[in-house]
Image (cartoon, helix red, strand yellow):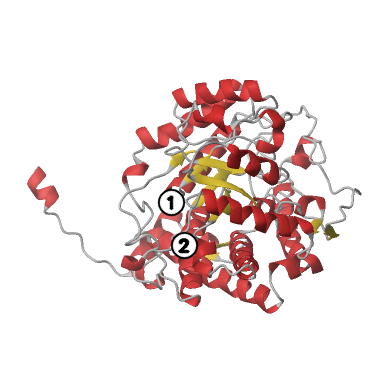
Amino acid sequence: MSIREIKNAVFPNNKYEIWEQVALKTIKSHSLETLYSETYEGIKLSPIYTKKGVKNRLEDSYSRGLYIKNNRRIAQKLYCTNWDDLTRQMVKAKECGQETVSFDVDNLHDTAKLDFGELSNIFNLRTTPLLLFTKYNFQLIARKLLQIDADHVIGALAVDLISSQLKRGYLYKLEGQTWADWKEMICKLDAKYPSLRTIVIDSTPYHNSGANAIQELAASLSEAIHYIEEMQKLGWEPHRTMKKMIFHFSIGNHFFMEIAKLRAFRLLWKTVCSAYEIDPVECNPLISAETSTFTKSLLEPYNNILRSGNEAFAAVAGGVNFLHVAPFNISDPSDEFAMRIARNTQLLLREESYLDKVVDPAGGSFYVETLTGELVEKAWELFQTIDKKAGIYSVLQSGWFQSIVKGTLSKRIEDIETRKKSMIGVNVFKQDSNVASLHISKSDDNHEMDSVKIEPLEQVRLAEKSESGDF
């Protein structure tokens, strides 16, 4: 065929039955039943998807009308315990493609030395976004940011007061001093840096406890509503609080499900905006993501490069605004080689895969569009259930939400142990040598006066039992 003939070629619009016959012939079977499978979200995956399964109009996809281009920022989180070492790493990271000021605040031992003025000599804080999430040092870091001579800072500096203490088994008392101090600091930061995001909804503690995509989405929406209602007590209108929010997700190993999760979230957020009679474009959500800790292993750690690459690809295709790729050496995330590989993963996705040239790479795929629609329906249903139970704070305090997450985790672990799900180097092609598993802090007995004790959501990894030789 000539080039002209190829360009003008027209393919027949075959019926579903014809596709089914071709599939049956390929697998040499009389039924497609063996090709159906069910996800941890309770979604039945089909071997063939058609336009009939797409409930929303394709032109109404999550990003239509919201973006002109894909503006993802490389936000590799740097790990250092020493401030002087951190600043040296910052300089090097900037030279190698870092596009945000992002580091593990809680891993820094000498936080008293943290100096945003010094950071501004490395990055222009007027044009380079901050991306600092903390569990324990919000007040300290915020005060230091307020001290610098600047009137414009962008990005995010935030703590999620709801999810930050879940692994320890605590919730800050709603009428306690921590919430009061947090609200006061939010107002101070808003007065000086109106463009800075200061409220993070961090779903990684749910993800790293084994939650499925539906549970992550429902928890994120419920947390957002909780913060909106808390800020209304100060007289803040919902749209004002929404503009202060940034959503942070972990991206797991089910490639298409993770793409659909991010796309579904934007559609769900549009529904929340409509409920408050707010234009979704006015409060377009800012999304940060990181590759999963839950899916990584100490056994043959170079496999983690492939896992993270797959997860990073899904994050970009799903439309995140900021992305951190975890270093493959999870026992030492500050390892220079591992950090370089992690950063270059993002550069490869941009410079060689051209994913940033397309606003919605997965848009129009009947499979992804159908998954997105099913997640929207199921996550909204769970969100409504949580809302009827008085919200996310209440279901965490009662332990109800922890119980459904732990139910999902049990299924995941059972599938790994029975090899129903394969994990290379963990339950398939596993070497005989055992390694000492990472120590993950458990909930302790240091009860804080400003907290209430709850059932903890412990942070785990699928490979832990295999690493210790338990299976």
363 and 64: which one is in front? Answer: 64
Residue at figure coordinates x 58%, y 65% from the top left? 221
Secondary structure found at label 2:
helix
Q: Is residue 30 in view? A: no
Residue drawn at point x = 47 percent, y = 29 percent: 344
- x then y, percent, for residue 11: 20, 59
Q: Residues within 10 Å of mark 1 (few under 14, many from 20)?
A: many
Q: How many marks?
A: 2
Residue that numbered label 2 is attached to: 266
Residue 470 percent coordinates (x, y)? 82, 40
- Residue 325 in percent (x, y) is at 54, 37
Which structural element holds mark 1? loop
In which quadrant of the rendered view does residue 301 lie? top right
Label 2 sits on what residue type? Arg
Side of 17 relative to 311 (left or right): left
Q: Which residue is mark 1?
A: 319
Quarter of the picture containing the N terminus is top left
**How would you rate the neighbour count of disc 2 (Cα within 10 Å): few for under 14, some for 14-19, many for 20 or more?**
many
Q: Amino acid at mark 1?
A: Gly
Q: Can residue 262 be seen by looking at this rendering? A: yes
Of callouts 2 and 1, which one flags the residue occurring earlier in the amino acid sequence? Answer: 2
Instruction: Give how far across and how far down residue 42 sits, in percent.
Output: 61, 66
Callout 2 touching callout 1 (CB < 8 Å)? yes
